[in-house]
Image (tube, grey):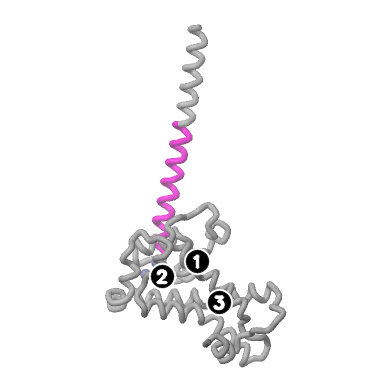
Amino acid sequence: MLFFPAVESQNFDLSVPFPPLYIIAIQVFVFMLSDDFWHYWSHRLLHVDFMYRNVHIIHHEYTAPFGIIGDYSHPIESIVYALNAVSGPIMYSLVASYTGAFKGAHVIAILVWILVKTFESIEVHTGYDFPWSPNKWIPVWTGADHHDYHHIEISNNFASMFRHMDYIFGTDKLYREHYNKRKQLELKMHQKNQKNQKNQKNQKIQKDQKVEKEE
Ligand SMILES: [Zn+2]
Ligand SMILES: [Zn+2]
C-alpha cells in the first residue's frame, strides 16, 4: 500500500523497459558504497560504551555467529541499519532530481541491492570462509573471516561489505596481524603434513622393497 507513494515521493524510477545492465550495476555499486560508509560509522557509534551496553550487546551475545545472527539485534540497531541500506537509493535519486542529469534509482536496481545486502548479511555471519566465498575473487570483500573476528575482538573490523573503511581508519590492525600469523601457521602445518606424507610414502616403498627381497 505504501510502496507506490514511497517510490513516487523519493523520485525512484519505475519505467519500462528496464535500464541496461551497466546502469543497474552502477546504481547497485553506489548503494553498496553508501551503505558501507554509513554502516561503518553507525557501527562504530554502536560500540561507544552507552550504546554498546544498551543496544549493540544483543548482536554480540554470539561470539561464534551463524547465518541468522545478521538480523539478531536490538530494534534501534535494525532501524539504523535499514536507514543505512536505503541511504544509497535516496541520495542517488536526490542528486538525480536536483541535477536532472540522470533518472532516479530504478526499482529493479533497488531489488537487486536488497538481495545483495541480504546475501552479504547472512554470508558474513555463517562462520564459513568457503573456497567460493566472494572474498576469494573480490579481495576487498569482508566475508565471514573478517566479521567473525569482530565477534571475537570487538575493537576491530566494523565494516559491512568492503574492507577499505577499516583499512583507512586503522580499525583492522589486530585482525591483519592475526590473519598473517594464522596464514604463516597454516603454511607451516601444510609443509609439515607434506613432509610427513613424503616420509610415510618412502617408508612404505622401503617396506615393500624389503618384502620383495625376502620373497
Ligand atoms: Zn555481526
Ligand atoms: Zn559490533
What number is the disc on residue 63? none
Q: Which residue in the protein does label 1 denote?
A: 120
Mark toward the viewer: 1 or 3: 1
Instruction: Report the residue at 53% width, 52% height from top.
Output: 131
The answer to whether one can see residue 94 in this image is no
Compute the Cα span from label 1 to label 3: 13 Å
Helix, strand or loop at mark 1: helix
Hey, what amino acid is under mark 3? Phe
Q: Quadrant of residue 152?
A: bottom left
User: x, y percentage for residue 53?
Assistant: 27, 74
Number of other residues with Cα within 10 Å of mark 1, as a class: few under 14, some 14 to 19, many 20 or more: many
Hey, what amino acid is under mark 1? Glu
Helix, strand or loop at mark 3: helix
Q: In the image, which residues are magenta? A: 172-196
Compute the Cα span from label 3 to label 2: 20 Å
Q: Which residue in the protein does label 2 denote?
A: 71
Q: Main secondary structure of the magenta part?
A: helix
Instruction: Report the residue at 47% width, 55% height from top.
Output: 129
User: x, y percentage for residue 43?
Assistant: 40, 74
Q: Which residue in the protein does label 3 denote?
A: 31
Mark toward the viewer: 3 or 2: 2
Q: Is residue 177 magenta?
A: yes
Mark toward the viewer: 1 or 2: 2
Name the foreground residue: 83 vs 145.
Answer: 83
Q: Is residue 171 magenta?
A: no
Instruction: Report the residue at 46% width, 67% height from top.
Output: 121
User: x, y percentage for residue 154?
Assistant: 34, 66
Mark 1 or mark 3: which comes first in sequence? 3
Compute the Cα span from label 1 to label 2: 12 Å
